[in-house]
Image (cartoon, helix red, strand yellow):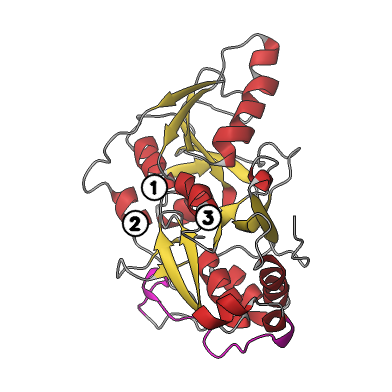
Amino acid sequence: MKTINKVQTAAAGLAVLLALSACGGTANSEPAAGDSKTSNTADISEGVQPDEAAVKLLPQSYKDKGELTVAMDLHYPPTTFLADDNTTPIGLNPDIARLVAKKLGLKLKFENTAFDTIIPGIDGGRYDFTATTMSPTAERLKVLDMVDYLNTGVSVAVAHGNPLNISNDDMCGKNIAVTKGSNAQLKHLPNISKWTCEDKGKPAINGVTLPNVQEALTQLASKRIDGVFYDTPALVWADQQQPNTFTVLTPQVDTRSDHTVAIGLKKGSPLSPALQAATQSVLESPEYKESLDNWGLDGLAITDAKLN
């Protein structure tokens, strides 16, 4: 598969960018009438009590500090983005991070950073953990401990009505966007290119590497690219926010691969046992299902916070 680094400035005022830049609120209640999910900044962890078993596993240094720092790239609705106030992190992943911190009896500090800088930041000690829809690949597990919290998948979005007649089995020679550092770039799109194109003597898929899914969907709407290969929930969300702009192809692609996503923290961290226990407590809580339902991700729940 050929990869083209092609980062272009989004067209100012483009409707899809405005729709996707708006951000949704974490929920412990439904938005008030007239409000949207993107304006509701209620904290889902409000009132959640620490889990005593998880707290017992917490190293004293973290108890003394009283705070965890979580790294996220806040450009990926509906899992990780900013509210309409352009300040409050919202989506499933901020919900999970807040709940984990609350289960440990700690405060939480968010650091908004590019996806491909998160792992180096954790390895260098700048961040304690990440919850940013990151899969536990063999490469990541060389430097990270990872704790499962969600099951997801990947799909392809094309222009509304699919005027180029692109299919999951025929993207050969097409310009398909992936986000920098994502599994779509590193694993899934190369797999699809090999299986459906290169092994059959057809042109490889042209992977267009872009910084985030908002930029990718903006370029798709302006016909600079032919499709976007990304996490299914984010593409479905975009289609719902901007009707008659995109078509999400079905079924999902690269179903041969595991699509579990996990919290990441430094390999061998003394925090890992406590964070695993806290995550397991979150998976068993009503707030977990509430967050999934709020962000249209029901059906993606898991029950085992496995430490990879």
- Residue 104: give x, y in percent of width and height: 62, 80
The magenta segment? 34-53
The x and y percentages for residue 244 are 42, 46
Cβ–Cβ under 8 Å for marks 1 and 2:
yes
- State if disc 3 and disc 2 touch (CB < 8 Å): no
Q: Secondary structure at mark 2?
A: helix
Contact, mark 3 vs mark 1 (Cβ under 8 Å): no
Residue at point 71%, 83% (across, down): 56
Whether residue 48 appears in magenta in the rendering, the answer is yes
Q: Which residue is mark 2?
A: 21
Q: Is residue 218 left or right of residue 227?
A: left
Main SS, magenta region, reads loop
What residue type is disc 3 on? Ile
In the rendered structure, the answer to whether residue 223 lies left or right of residue 286 reads: left
The answer to which quarter of the image holds residue 220 is top left
Mark 3, residue position? 122
Label 3: element kind:
helix
Q: Report the quarter where the C terminus lies.
A: bottom right
In the displayed structure image, the side of residue 5 where residue 85 appears, left or right? left
> Circle 1 sits on which residue?
214
Mark 3 or mark 1: name the one nearer the start of the chain: 3
The structure residue drawn at horizontal position 57% and vertical position 81%, both measured from the top left corner, is 63
Q: Earlier in the sequence, mark 2 or mark 3?
A: 2
Q: Is residue 44 visible?
A: no
Figure disc tally: 3
Relative to the observer, which residue lies in front, 226 or 275? 275
Residue 257 is at least partly visible in this image:
yes
The question of residue 9 being in magenta is answered with: no
Q: Earlier in the sequence, mark 1 or mark 2?
A: 2
Residue drawn at 66 percent across, 77 percent down: 58
What amino acid is labelled 2 in the image?
Ser
Q: Is residue 161 above or below residue 206?
A: below
